[in-house]
Amino acid sequence: MAVLVIDAGNSSTTVACYANGRITRATSISGGIKNDAVRCAAAVRRVVEGRRRFDGAMLASVVPAANDAWKRLVKRETGLDTLLLTHTIRLPMKLDYRHPETTGADRLADIAGALARYGAPALVIDIGTAVTYDLISSDRRFFTGVIGPGPDIMARALYDYTALLPDVKWWLRPAPRLPKDTQGAMRFGIEAAFCGTLRETVTRLLPLIEDGEPRLIATGGFAARFANPLNMNFVIDPDLTLYGIGWLYDYQKEKQ
């Protein structure tokens, strides 16, 4: 059996196949279905092509306005119904959160994937447009989390709120050790500020776990770039969100 998994984010969408605990055929589309439905449909076809059977599809979306469009596209291209990942489905953790309905689907997938792969307690950081930090206790409670700006938001703010600073494609190469021009100075500032934010946030969160040494897990496209320099023993797991989506689909089918 296989599951079509879809991670619809603010800046990009990734479609993949989850089967036997593995993620394969992952394809990312810049933007989303509202911007490029044709490429999204092509990505879905590539994922399902050649496999005899898919058990279903699951969508983790932080763009609610796109949910119905994704369901229609998946039904048209594959004939599959799509299960929406929300706080109301069966979960392997307790949401000890004041308003659990506000917990993003990507965060639910990250937490579930981390529990399935690494156990608890754990701290999961997901570096995307925003960066999320999710803390899980040893008794499998998601009891606190933090949301902050990702590096792209920092870069965009410098461009949007100044008259002369350029729109820097900071991700194309590492920041220079010794900046000698405006773009280099911006890349240095963005990376230093973001790494400093990561370190300080993790340092403040870790003491909140009182019942064990948490595993530190980083995911998202820039996880290795920013988590490794912290030297805090992070496990880098780029597929964690997709894995969590697929694992949660299977978890719905397990006997209570």
Image (tube, rainbow, N blue to C red):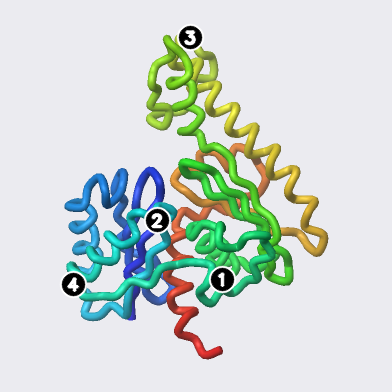
Alpha carbon distance from label 2 to label 4: 31 Å
Amino acid bearing label 3: Lys
Q: On the rendered image, what quadrant is the C terminus found in?
A: bottom right
**Mark number for residue 50?**
4
Q: Quadrant of residue 17?
A: bottom left
Residue at numbered disc 2 = 64
Earlier sequence position, callout 1 versus callout 3: 1
Please tell me whether mark 2 or mark 4 is closer to you in this view: 2
Q: The residue tagged with tag 2: helix, strand or loop?
A: helix
Amino acid type of the residue that numbered disc 1 sits on in the rendered structure? Ala
For marks 2 and 4, the one nearer the N-term is 4
Q: How far from the left and from the top, in percent, is residue 245?
A: 44, 67
- Residue 199 is situated, as x and y percent measured from the top left of the image, at 67, 38
218 to the left or right of 44: right
Q: Name the residue under label 1.
A: 116
Q: Camera-side residue: 196 or 70?
A: 70
Residue where numbered disc 3 is placed? 180
Residue 171 visible, this orientation:
yes
What residue is rendered at 50% in x and 33% in y? 151
37 vs 187: above or below: below
